[in-house]
Amino acid sequence: MADIQDAQPVFQIQRVYLKDLSLEQPNSPQILVEQGQPSVDINLAVEVQPVVEGIYEVAVTATVTTKVGDRTLFLCEAKEAGIFEIRNIEEDQMSPILGIACPGIVYPYLRAVVADTVTRAGFPPVHLAEVNFQAMYEAQQQGNGALNA
């Protein structure tokens, strides 16, 4: 009976946490009184690190750069991570779980952190759009091979 339970697939969230947060306003206060429509550039990245056997850290990083002309209004970078226990999963299913399911769990927390941080800095909140992690994962698979696991 113990062998049957030991072979059962396991997928559990151990913890979701803010791993890193940075906000810079390099041209304040002068740029705050300038007129102009700011441009916003958002980049996302997913990292997967094994912690110990069957435990993985999956981190999603958002870098938000807002400029007026060629001068930076603010730069916000946040990394939200999760620790996941994943055991007894077929090898061909591990990469999609780590590259699609886990980032999808972590991402809503990251969105809240970015919006809150930007608001606390005195700007209108930046609401990160929903992300299709499956499409992102598939593009990465086609572009440069397997997700780093």
Image (cartoon, rainbow, N blue to C red):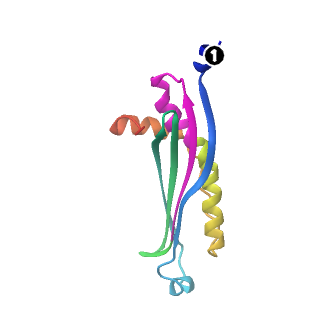
- Give me the residue at 62% from left, 55% from top: 111
Give the residue type that dot 1 points to: Ala
| Residue at disc 1, secondary structure | helix
Q: How far across and how far down the image is residue 75, in percent?
A: 50, 69
| Crowd band around label 1 with a 10 angstrom C-alpha radius: few (<14), some (14–19), many (20+) | few
Q: What residue lies at 57% left-to-right and 43% top-to-bottom?
A: 83
Identity of the residue furthest to the top in this view: 1
Can see residue 85? yes
The relative height of residue 27 versus residue 142 in the rendered view (above or below) is below
Magenta segment: 75-103
Question: Who is closer to the viewer here, 18 or 87?
Answer: 87
Q: Is residue 102 magenta?
A: yes
Q: Is residue 4 magenta?
A: no
> 55 or 120, which lies in front?
55
Give the labeled residue for mark 1: 2
Extreme residue toward the front, this view = 2
